[in-house]
Image: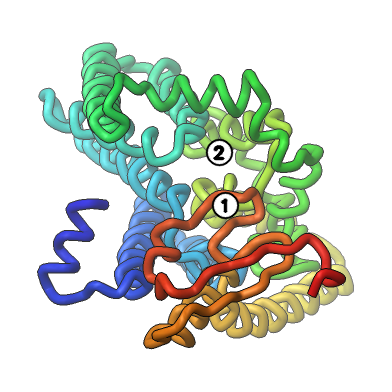
Amino acid sequence: FAGYLRAMETIGIRDHYAILTTLRVIVSLLNLAMFAALLLYNIPRENRSARHTALFLLCFSFAFPYIRTAYSVELLSSTLFFGACLYYQMKRDAGASGMRYPCWTGLLFGMAFYCRFQIAFAGIGFIIWMLIQKDRRWKDLLLIAVSFFIAVAFNTWLDSGFYHQLTFTPERYLQLNIIEGKASTFGTASPIFYIGILAAVLLAPPFSIYLFATTFRPLFTRTRNLYVLCTFIFLLAHMLVSHKEDRFLFPIFGLLPLLSAWALTEIEPVFEKRPGWLKAIMRGTMWFSMGLNMFLLILFMFIPYAQGIAFGKKLRDRFRDQQVETTVYCIERHPYLTESKNHMVWYHDALNPKVRFITVNKLKPL
């Protein structure tokens, strides 16, 4: 990020919000392009209907993160990890040999891991996939592991330099959030929470519920598939963790259109044998959900995912040239604190220093 920041300052962009907006666009396009390439590579070219279905779901499902969020560490981690999976898959299918492509795969895995530690759950799926292949490439697995740890060592060196002491961030994260249960203090939820989210991701309800149900079919019919294993283990592990947020599932959202397209292709002959009235109901439900999805898609494009950040920008613009001390009273927290009381220093630094906040817990003192 420091290198990106220096590059933006070099070309004359110093506004904090403009810098992150540009980063959002870059990461968003990379994530979309990577998953589009992954879908096209894993669906046969002759199966045009499945390709079109998967691409439509990927590009136009209203709940996908790059519609509103555009940038998050989950998206960046997803881009690096599944981009590495696709790169390795393509090289392996082409019969490539040598050390270069396994090493690049491991380095990308290491960078993805440090962007979001939970991507390691999907990494377990990759390891299982490697081990169940008929031609187990132990050399590749070793090179990937060595390269992964080189990336981890490099990031540990960066963290240690920042904190001025030896710091192994994954261990600290595991200790604080899992063993000591700090993450649970931000709220807990049952596994049904994630089921509800995933049931509304592809298009919009009620047809999204049917599409979500179809994504389970490849879990039984394509059990040896790389992306099925990554999705299943990633989702199962997150369901077992007590603290849940919708953004935690962002890394696998882009795989759901692929799983659904595979399933729809497999069940299409069965669907054609259904009674005419049932097919009419299904088609009517689909068109209703598509209409609702397009309405929500347009609506959500103009509603920020992090509305506090959008409000913070308005506050910055309002007091940009203020020359006198200004007091802003806030209920419970000021706009530059998240709900979990984390300070958004990057955005707060862009605010006029003459603006100070006074937080009150109730309206009565005002």
Q: Along the horizontal axis of the image, is 187 left or right of 50?
A: right
Disc ID at residue 17: none
Residue at the spot 59% in from the left edge and 84% down from the top edge: 298
Q: Along the horizontal axis of the image, is 115 left or right of 58?
A: left
Q: Please name whichever residue, 327 or 257, is drawn nearer the observer in this view of the structure.
A: 327
Q: Is the C terminus in the top left, top right, bottom left or bottom right quadrant?
A: bottom right
The relative height of residue 233 versus residue 328 in the rendered view (above or below) is above
Find residue 39 and report its horizontal and vertical position in percent. 42, 55
Q: Is residue 146 visible?
A: yes
The three-letter amino acid code for the residue at tag 2 is Thr
Find residue 360 and report its horizontal and vertical position in percent. 74, 63
Q: Label 2, on which residue?
A: 231
The relative height of residue 113 versus residue 324 in the rendered view (above or below) is above
Q: Label 1, on which residue?
A: 256
Find residue 282 and report its horizontal and vertical position in percent. 79, 70
- Mark 2 and mark 1 in contact? Answer it, CB < 8 Å: yes
Residue at the spot 23% in from the left edge and 26% down from the top edge: 157
The relative height of residue 197 versus residue 22 in the rendered view (above or below) is above
Residue at the spot 39% in from the left edge and 41% down from the top edge: 115
Q: Is residue 272 visible?
A: no
Label 2: which secondary element: helix
The relative height of residue 40 versus residue 310 in the rendered view (above or below) is above
Q: Gap between marks 2 and 1, in whole Å?
A: 9 Å
